[in-house]
Amino acid sequence: MQHAEITGWGKCLPPAVLSNDDLTTFMDTTDEWITSRTGIKERRICHCNFSDMAIVAAKRALAAADLDPAELDLILLGSLTNDSYCPNTASIVQDAIGATNAASIDINSACTGFLYGLHIGTNLIRTGAHKKVLVLGGEFISHYMNWSLRDVAVLFGDACGAVVIESSDQEVGLLAAKIGCDADAKYAIQITNLGSAYSRLSEEFLYIGWNFDGREVFKRAVKCMSLACADVLDQLGLSVDDISLVVPHQANKRILDALARRVGIAEEKVFVNVHKYGNTSAGTIPVALTEALEEDRIKPGDHVLFATFGAGLTWGAGIVRWGDRVNPLKQSDAELPPNDKTALEILEPHIKRYTARG
Ligand code: ACO
């Protein structure tokens, strides 16, 4: 059987930083509340399109794999904040990077979009249907934010990450995965007033709202991720001692601590960057994976455990056995369009729009 080795990885973080103190300039919150509840200190705000971030992440991942984009036969892009409903963002990426032979699919499963995509891409390679797949995950969630909602707006940030997976005879790549969905709690995270469920005649149409039951999400996240982790360990007959690093969805440091306790894994083995970027939804795992490689936290042959949850409530876990190479083959010079604005300057019209109505 063929396996799907991760041969390239890349991330794109927009440069504008929105700190907790910046949030206090227009919202009734404090750095102390945000830090103690979530571990988040700052997040990035995108000044361009979501696809610009995805294209940069894709080019960096392709350079790391030293792969000609024309060799890709599939692009899977996890996001809920696409440039447009039509065309899909995977097509925009396909065109921009010159992946002329790749089918292009968007996956809307919120924060789990990257792991869902990695699972699908890996299994398409296993069957022989595809050979070289680009899997992206990312979000331009600041665009979809209602800046009057302090319980939601402080949590998120913008970013995109990508990996290249290629058919391999070696037993490496995503060797086990368990994905699922607690749809009975689907309205615990809901973006409203956008989509065909909402009347176009309503004055509220396109005035984005969020229904968000943070406590319910917190409880479900810890339960579902820990059960999924136990499942994938069991599938491979491994124990937590065999795991070198956990690269989890970065939603909240307290969720990561609770997950580590439930799974029985040392906190030092859990990769954390939520303090720098907040919750970038589908972007968290590919960005964290790229940073873990940059920081030499992954060695050849390591078992890396992914765990994730998101709106839906979708959830999942996977174990990757890393291949021989932990360094990129090449570097890409791809960059985002220039930006000379601060995060608050970028957001100013949006903050005004939402805070004017309260
Ligand atoms: N600043 C100050 N106070 C706030 C803020 C804020 N930004 N937001 C809420 N509060 C207040 C509330 O009004 C409430 O006040 P009250 O008690 O007077 O009514 C109080 O703080 C709520 O505090 P807690 O209930 O103690 O908050 P909790 O510890 O549950 O933390 C949090 C809330 C951070 C949202 C937590 O529940 C959480 O992280 N949940 C998981 C959410 C998540 O990660 N979702 C990711 C999935 S999203 C996706 O997939 C797209």
Image (cartoon, grey):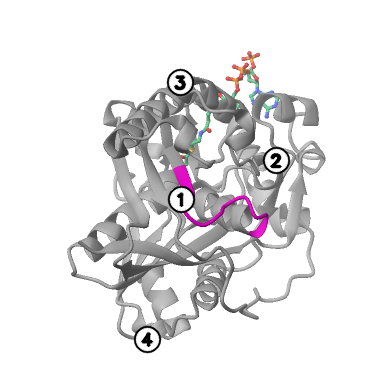
Q: What amino acid type is highlighted by mark number 3?
A: Lys
Label 3 sits on a secondary structure element that is helix
Q: What amino acid type is highlighted by mark number 2?
A: His
The span picked out in magenta is 294-305
Q: Which residue is mark 3?
A: 219
Mark 4 CB lies closer than 8 A to ligand 1 = no
Q: What amino acid type is highlighted by mark number 1?
A: Leu
Q: CA distance from mark 3 to mark 2?
A: 21 Å
Label 2: few (<14), some (14–19) or many (≥20) C-alpha neighbours in 10 Å: some
- 1 vs 3, front mark: 3
Quarter where residue 254 is shown:
top right
* 196 and 241: which is toward the camera: 241
Q: Which residue is mark 4?
A: 70
Between discs 1 and 2, the one toward the N terminus: 1
Task: Identify the image quadrant of the C terminus.
Answer: top right
Cβ atoms at labels 3 and 2 below 8 Å apart: no
Q: CA distance from mark 1 to mark 2?
A: 31 Å
Q: Which residue is mark 1?
A: 206
Task: Identify the image quadrant of the N terminus.
Answer: bottom left
Q: Which residue is mark 2?
A: 275
Residue at left offset 71%, top offset 59%: 346
Q: What amino acid type is highlighted by mark number 4?
A: Ala
